[in-house]
Image (cartoon, helix red, strand yellow):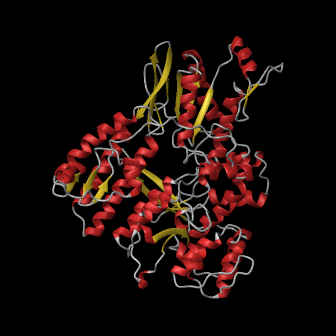
Amino acid sequence: MGTDSMAIKDIERMEVSEFVQTIQLKFANYQPKPVKRVEIPKEGSDKTRPLGIPTMFDRLIQQCILQVMEPICEAKFYKHSYGFRPNRGAENAIAECYRFMQLSNLHYCVDIDIKGFFDNVNHSKLLKQIWSMGIRDKQLLAIIGKMLKAPIKMPDKTMVFPTKGTPQGGILSPLLSNIVLNELDWWVSSNWENMPTRYDYYTTTHKNGTVARLGAHEALRKTGVKEMWIVRYADDFKIFCRNHETATKTFHAVKGWLKDRLKLDISPEKSKIVNLRKRHSEFLGFRIKVRKKRNKYVVTSSMSDKAVQKATSKLIEQIKRIQRPKDETDKYRMILDYNSKVMGIHNYYKVATRVNLDCRKIAYQVMIVMKNRLRKSLKSEAYYLKRKQKVPDVAKYISSRYGRSKQLRFGSIYPIAPIGYVQHRHPMSKKRSVNKYTAAGRVEIHKSLGIDTITLLALMKNPVSDRSIQYADNRISLYAGQYGNCAVTGIHLDFEDIHCHHKTPRHRGGKDEYKNLIIVHKDIHRLIHATDCTTINRYFSEYKGCIKLRKLNELRKLAGNEAIVSLDNSTAN
């Protein structure tokens, strides 16, 4: 909530025409309201991180600008930039690091930490960079300029008027930060990867369509030109070089370039050159280096010490909450939250080659706390089998992932995911054909979706408050079983679109059993229960290209409503 104390629910009450008119008026004469400053603790230290929270209407204005600017900027961003960009993530950045280290044998890494990047972005330089990217609407640039200079309301109620920096917490800030450092990406690229040559040397086209300038690079190596490759995630980046001499020259060149061109300083204590054959380098919570195996060097990686400590303390804190629940429902929610934390750790760090050793360390400390604090209710599968008792049903999303583990435990009858049971997986590079701005690219995105683990974790953390534990558990299992798709339309569902429908309604004796529930889009849920022809026609006109009529009518009949004749004549019998 910003300085005007307005929430999204206040905007929901507005009529559509009134809302559109309000946004148009704000664009016509835009004056941002003060940004609320909030200090949040930095993980792993006593310091705090400043966040700027704009008002709700200012956030909507920023979202409108983002939707216009992002496709233009994405076409001009460098391919090895992965932070805050659609269809890219930390896994892709780690995969690219592995490739440079193991396949290209680039074993010297230049680590540069920009001192207070978000607080020191030069406003004039940023607006010039936006102009040079082809965004030359002067009214839009004026609005962005006003956003950057919006007054900040500090926790002590005083007002600060910024002359540089972009507020962390704004919707537009990640895109603006990428625009600032995009110039660095292309400058590093122009010094080696895309350096122009007098002659056209041979190239190789890979299966994914990328073109490698192998001939030009072979010729450049003979000249003594510095070989450098950059991988960047937001303001955190690494430059890989072939030898120490090149890495030293690159370090000083990048340091000087950042100061001269972007007016940014580096942090001397955090910036260094690392020989990856001897020491680790930390990147995005991972420790990476290479080790000799037979006659070559291979990547070895693990969770950083800070990441291990953070994960351990987070799980132990959650166990303490499980120990003293208000009631049985609250205990179930606490265990769900614990499971979501375990799955989140596994999903992110499983691309580390030694993640199993790291999770074993975490499991050792966590299990000691768990046995001490939950000893009365903590049971294993062996415990039930030894006493010839029925083993509690394991939720399908837990069973599919952790069912084979002997570390699986039960808090009363609820499964507790084992942190020590994890399997390493090779990180995937960003697929060239994936692009949300083209039809073919969107098809590729939908092919690779599978189960959306982010939405799955959100379901685990946000059970429906007035429903049973069985309902909440089965809702998660159904989402996983349906691969996140609506059962009637096949549309992939975001968290806010998910509705869990009772096939036989509760007022007709339907229960919260798995077989009596189904995941559908919220609009389809309304269509199942709709009796008014206007409502039926409305939702048919929106979804008629993808509705499975037979499935829809089955659900309508079970709900006690009449079947619908056809998609072309959307009226009930």
Given residues 279 and 54, the one toward you in this image is 279
Q: Residue furthest right?
A: 199
- Inspect this view and state whether residue 276 appears: yes
Given residues 280 and 122, the one toward you in this image is 280
Q: Quadrant of residue 225?
A: top right
188 to the left or right of 383: right
What is the x, y in percent for residue 371? 19, 49
Q: How many numbered callouts?
A: 0
Above or below: residue 38 compared with residue 211: below
148 to the left or right of 338: right
Q: Residue at x 60, y 64 (%)?
A: 59
Above or below: residue 369 compared with residue 104: below
353 to the left or right of 63: left
Q: Quadrant of residue 150?
A: bottom right
What is the x, y in percent for residue 433? 70, 43
Q: Residue at x 52, y 73 (%)?
A: 7
Given residues 84 and 129, the one toward you in this image is 84
What is the x, y in percent for residue 545? 71, 68
- Inspect this view and state whether residue 275 appears: no
Above or below: residue 79 compared with residue 393: above
What is the x, y in percent for residue 278? 43, 19
Q: Residue at x 57, y 43 (%)?
A: 234
401 to the left or right of 79: left
Given residues 350 and 478, the one toward you in this image is 478
Q: In the rendered view of the protein, which quadrant contains the C terminus?
A: bottom right
Above or below: residue 570 compared with residue 381: below
